[in-house]
Each structure stands twice: as C-alpha cells, then as structure tokens.
C-alpha cells in the first residue's frame, strides 16, 4: 500500500506552510504601510487625544481621514477632521503626527 501523500502533495504542503508563516510576519495594509512605526489605529488615537486635549468635541465631527506621507523627510501622518454637515467655515482641522516620534500637532481650520 502506498503512503497517503505523494511527493507532489508533500511539496505543496511544505510550500503552503512557508507561505502561511511568511504571511504572519508581514504587516497588514489595514494596519498601515509596511515602512511605518505607527499603525492607522495608533495614529487615529493620538490625533483624537490631541483634539480632545485642545477642547474639541469630536462628536460634532465625521470619522477622520488618516493618510501617510512617506515622501517627506519626516514621514508624517495627516489626520483630517471635518465637522458634520452643514459644515460652517473653518469647520475642519488637521492633526499631523510624526511617525518616528509620535509627536502630534493640531492645525486648526480657517
């Protein structure tokens, strides 16, 4: 009687394990770009904490938009907050987060 797995099936099983193990060590794009120290959720939390510490009531704002700018030397995250509709003039602000230091800076709308 022949063994259950042929050499081809055994090779495929080994390949599947290697791919699975490699996938576990890579960062998900949902967490952020692979070359960043911070994840999207960490940046969002830092930006929200910065807004709250500046007296901003976030319940009046839509869900923020988080994007990473890796082209600059600083590698910064930009988090944009837009007031819920109808948006008055100046009803927005941005928080810039430095990826290396986690320092956050509020930029009010004008």
Image: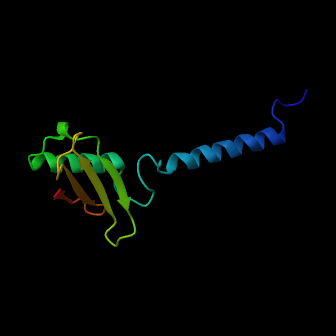
Q: Position of 28 compared to 37: left or right?
A: right
- Give the image location of residue 36, x and y in percent: 39, 59
Q: Position of 78 compared to 108: left or right?
A: right
- The correct choice, above or below, for 84 with respect to 78 in the image is above
- The correct choice, above or below, for 104 with respect to 22 in the image is below
- Give the image location of residue 26, x and y in percent: 50, 51
Number of marks = 0
Rendered-image quadrant of the C terminus: bottom left
Q: Residue at x 18, y 38 (%)?
A: 60
Rendered-image quadrant of the N terminus: top right
Q: Residue at x 27, y 52 (%)?
A: 80
Residue closest to the eye, 19 or 45:
45
Q: Residue at x 82, y 42 (%)?
A: 8
Q: Residue at x 22, y 40 (%)?
A: 86
Furthest toward the right, the residue is 1
Furthest toward the top, the residue is 1
Q: Position of 16 compared to 5: left or right?
A: left
Furthest toward the bottom, the residue is 73
Residue 20, quarter of picture: top right
Residue closest to the eye, 2 or 73:
73
- Give the image location of residue 15, x and y in percent: 70, 46
Question: Coloured how?
Answer: rainbow
Q: Position of 92 compared to 19: left or right?
A: left
Residue 83, quarter of picture: top left
- Give the image location of residue 94, x and y in percent: 23, 55
- The correct choice, above or below, for 9 with respect to 77 in the image is above
């Amino acid at each position: 009687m022949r063994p259950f797995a042929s050499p081809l099936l055994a090779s495929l099983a080994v390949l599947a394990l290697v791919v699975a193990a490699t996938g576990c060590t890579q960062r998900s794009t949902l967490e952020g770009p692979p070359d960043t120290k911070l994840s999207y959720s960490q940046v969002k939390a830092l930006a929200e904490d910065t807004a709250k510490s500046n007296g901003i009531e976030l319940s009046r704002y839509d869900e923020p938009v988080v994007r990473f700018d890796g082209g600059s030397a600083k590698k910064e995250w930009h988090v944009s907050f837009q007031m819920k509709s109808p948006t008055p003039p100046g009803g927005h602000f941005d928080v810039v987060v430095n990826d290396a230091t986690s320092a956050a800076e509020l930029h009010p709308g004008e």
